Amino acid sequence: MGAKGRTVTISDVAAEAGVAPMTVSRVINTSDRVAAVTAERVQAAISRLGYVPNLMAGGLSSRRSRMVGAIVPTITHPMFATLIDSLTETLRAAGYQVMLSLSGYKGGEDDLVRGLLGRRPDGMLVTGVEHAPATRQMLQEAGIPVVEIFDTGKRPIDMLVGFDHAAVGAAVAEYFLVRGHDRFAMFSAGDRRALARQHGFAERVATAGGQLISAPVLPAPSTITAGREAMRALLPVLDHRTALFCSSDLLAFGAIVEARQSGIAVPDRLAVCGFGDFELGAASEPSFTTVTVEAARIGRNAAAMILARLVGQTVERRIEVPFRIVQRGSS
């Protein structure tokens, strides 16, 4: 929504650039028919105003598209798959469909947001609270309900439902500390939320006077193989009882497989906690401790927030969902 409380239009862009609306349309659709200097001026105006071309102009029979755009990194992660299932189910019951895009962990959110907004969804769901300035502006200017998920932050674009990743890391450290551990390691993927968990873990360990012997940052998304390789690198310094926190259950499973193959007793010599509560955590031998988050609740809350706003209701802008540590045989 624009500064005056309405969606930015092609006429606004034309006025900003000092050209006719038809010229803006030509820049968007057939830029080779417009002088380069003019095209640059129009593109600059589009960027300043956060304008998103309507790719469905004339294609709707009403003002509502009955669609909600959603961007998550992956659906191979059970937490995101569960979240999207509950989001889709709740919206479908209200007559809405979901347009889903996967951002991965290497950037590119800007193009996905632009592409989805260009199809004029009635609401948007995006993952995390860290966005490029241009992305944030597009979402603010869209004039539709926007929910950021899976994170917390002080400046939500519109609405927010998630949890504190640094608090997760601190809670896992505390869990190990009360069980008498004083040597720690952490395997973390390189995405922002995993690194926040690592920071919370390391900070609590340091506060308690513990020793963090290793904290490698691994490529995202996490894999079992990466967990095995990280554990292989840790083995030479694993000469005393150690507690290991992994930012994903996949890393934890790989670490346990490699440790057991190397003769490291779990949990006597190596205690392990993962994150995500994947099915393989309970099926592993030994089953391993993990952090579980109510992903389905995040999806339902996000859908309910969007639906409430679409009918003009006032909704709570920030909802924090709980997490808990599920103790199993690895700790």
Image (cartoon, rainbow, N blue to C red):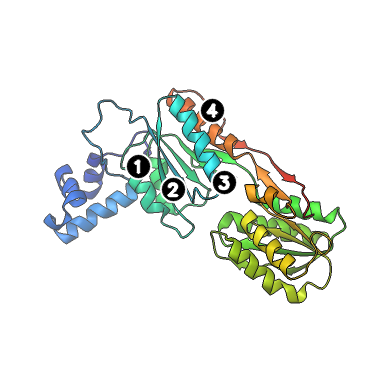
Which is nearer the N-term, disc 4 or disc 1? 1
Q: Does dot 3 land on a helix, a strand or a loop?
A: helix
Quarter of the image with the N terminus in it: top left
Q: Which residue does the numbered mark 2 point to in the structure image? A: 136
Helix, strand or loop at label 4? It is: loop
Q: Position of residue 171 (x, y in %)?
A: 75, 50
User: In the figure, residue 92 lies in which quadrant?
Assistant: top left
Residue beneath label 4, please?
315
Please state which amino acid type lies under the numbered disc 1: Leu
Q: CA distance from mark 4 to mark 3?
A: 28 Å
Q: Position of residue 64 (x, y in %)?
A: 33, 28
Report if the CB atoms under discs 4 and 3 are less than 8 Å apart.
Answer: no
Q: Does residue 287 show up?
A: yes
Q: Residue placed at 63% from the left, 61% from the top?
A: 188
Total marks shown come to 4
Q: Estimate how packed mark 2 is, as few (under 14), some (14 to 19) or many (20 or more) residues with alpha carbons within 10 Å.
A: some
Label located before the other in sequence (2 or 4)? 2
Left-right relation of 194 to 21:
right
Where is residue 195 shown, x and y percent of the image? 62, 59
Q: Please name the residue that numbered disc 3 is placed on.
A: 78
**Residue 248 seen by the camera:** no
- CA distance separating discs 2 and 3: 27 Å
Residue 117, numbered label:
1
**Which numbered disc, 2 or 1, marks the residue that appears first in the sequence?**
1
**Mark 1, secondary structure of its residue:** helix
